[in-house]
Amino acid sequence: VFDQLDLVTYEEVVKLPAFKRKTLVLLEAHGVGRRHIKNTLITKHPDRFAYPIPHTTRPPKKDEENGKNYYFVSHDQMMQDISNNEYLEYGSHEDAMYGTKLETIRKIHEQGLIAILDVEPQALKVLRTAEFAPFVVFIAAPTITPGINE
């Protein structure tokens, strides 16, 4: 119902003074490379940026530890947290669930870092608050002009 009734036909816009953003959201046309951009920013500027560690219901693989690449949780726990609106977004892949918890984003902010998110556009409904203060960047596909690369 939330998505069906949320049709914005007009949105008031006001100019705000510059302020430090807490969250950088990367949106893209599919296949443009937002994950590469995210990984490059985190690698080159680990003192400024961090990526929230996702939660999953799949079992850990050999050499994986909880809290490093993923937080491993039971299916029941994840479903309970989803019903409590604790996830920014979530989905299933190969019989396992994956998701980004809002708390992991908050922990990045508490460390004084900017959280980088590569999410689907629907997640902006949750993020567009003073708490997350997102700076949203849309990464467009390059224009293909006949004759330029010939």
Image (tube, rainbow, N blue to C red):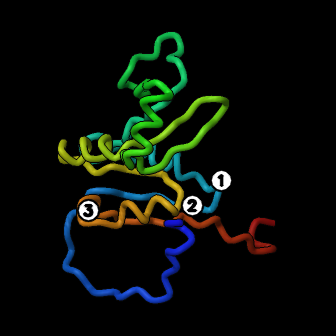
Decide which of 109, 147 is in the foreground and name it. Answer: 109
Q: Contact (CB < 8 A) between labels 1 and 3? A: no
Q: CA distance from mark 2 to mark 3?
A: 20 Å
Question: Across the whole image, how many numbered discs are drawn on residues?
Answer: 3
Question: What's the residue type where badge 3 is placed?
Answer: Arg
- Between 89 and 150, the residue placed more toward the observer is 89
Depth order, front residue of 47/12: 12
Contact flag, marks 1 and 2 (Cβ < 8 Å): yes
Quarter of the image where the C terminus is located: bottom right
Seen at 48% across and 40% down, the residue is: 99
- Residue 132, image x and y in percent? 28, 59
In the picture of the structure, the residue carrying the numbered disc 3 is 21
For the residues marked 1 and 3, what is the alpha-carbon distance in whole angstroms?
A: 26 Å
Q: Is residue 129 left or right of residue 120?
A: left
The answer to whether residue 112 shows anywhere in this view is yes
136 left or right, relative to 6: left
**Mark 3 residue element:** loop
Q: Are marks 2 and 3 in contact (CB under 8 Å)?
A: no
Kind of residue at badge 2: Glu
Q: Which residue is label 2 attached to?
A: 28
Q: Which mark is residue 141?
A: none
Residue 31 - label:
1
Q: How many residues crowd around disc 1 within 10 Å: few (fewer than 14), some, or many (20 or more)?
A: few
Q: Residue at horizontal 54%, vertical 64%? A: 139
x then y, percent, for residue 56? 49, 30
